[in-house]
Image (cartoon, helix red, strand yellow):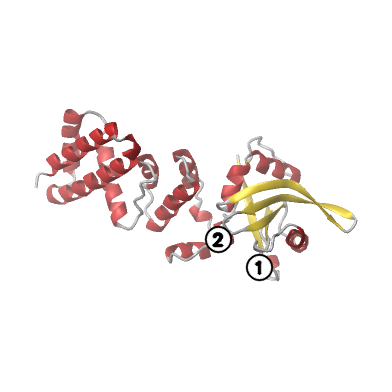
Amino acid sequence: MNYYEDIKKELINNEINRKVKTHSINKSDLTTYYNVGKMLSKAGKCYGESIIKEYSKKLTNELGKGYGVSNLKRFRQFYLMIEKGATLSHLLTWSHYIEIIPINNVTIINYYINICIYQNLSVRELRNKIKNKEYERLDEETKNKLINNEKLNIKDNIKNPILIKNIHNYTEITEKILQKLVLEDISSFMKELGDSFSFIDNEYKIKIGERYNYIDLLLFNIKFNCYVVIELKVTELKKEHIGQIQVYMNYIDKNLKKINQDKTIGIIICKKENKYVIEYSSDARIIARTYELLW
């Protein structure tokens, strides 16, 4: 079989499609690179690894730039990745897949593909998530659910630790400063919690008896149809933190929650975990996570 001529024909047709069908460039690119990768894989088995260098030289001479050895190897990696079970989605661009190809684990690959789709991530946003090891910051229970294609709940999507940008390079962190850093990039913060979060208010004022109290952050999750109370702590998790957030959650349930909405979730974001405090908490709706500052 003349693999070279078939590869050249595939690439030429793709260039034509890119010029006349701009609305389907992603589909054309991904389909083409998959097919080329498949032929390169077969050619390599027949003629050895050096065939990629030979094809690269000929394609560059006949078609121009863009077909260097590294790109052809990437096409082959792309094909092999899809064959191993990675999702081929035309909602992603080739640039997205370039970021994902170096990952060796199919479960991790599909995790990033899915969040690209659900969160409409740019290439830069995807690159940052991979760099910040978002998948690795999921708990083991969540990873097992992903492997088994089980349904995730709101807790499963919350990273640990939660990354917060310290753009001012503060060295002494108080709760007020921590809240300030969160609010300065609230969109990134909410994505650390998962998807479908919307911001309601910070220092949300509630009256309990004769005293006013202030909830650090009040969010709503559209997907899970519930309010989310967040308390920020710069110490180790303490039992009094559990009591405090539980009161706030009960207040929201009694005064804000509609009958068709689920019960309020509470998230305590602290400097250091205390697994025993959570273990002996009687309220499964309360979630504890640590934070880490990005300098």
Q: Residue at x 48, y 50 (%)?
A: 118
Give SS at disc 1.
loop
Give SS at disc 2.
helix
Q: What residue type is labelled 1?
A: Ala
Q: In which quarter of the image is the C terminus?
A: top right
Query: How far across and down, in percent of the image, does residue 8 sit?
Result: 17, 37
**Residue bearing mark 1:** 284
**Residue bearing mark 2:** 156
Q: Which residue lies furthest to the left in this view?
A: 1
Q: How crowded is mark 1: few (under 14 residues within 10 Å), some or many (20 or more)?
A: few
Quarter of the figure with residue 247: bottom right
Q: Which residue lies furthest to the front in this view?
A: 259
Q: Residue at x 70, y 66 (%)?
A: 277
Drawn side of residue 205 relative to residue 119, left or right: right
Total numbered labels? 2
Drawn side of residue 183 relative to residue 250, left or right: left
Q: Residue furthest right?
A: 210
Mark linked to residue 92: none
Residue toward you, 86 or 178: 86
Q: Residues within 10 Å of mark 2 (few under 14, many from 20)?
A: some
Q: Which amino acid does label 2 sit on?
A: Asp
Q: Is residue 268 in view?
A: no
Drawn side of residue 45 relative to residue 128, left or right: left
Label 2 to label 1: alpha-carbon separation: 13 Å
Query: How far across and down, in percent of the image, does residue 157 sit?
Result: 55, 57
Residue toward you, 195 or 172: 195
Dot 2 or dot 1: first in sequence order is 2
Q: Which residue is drawn at 35% across and 55% down?
A: 86
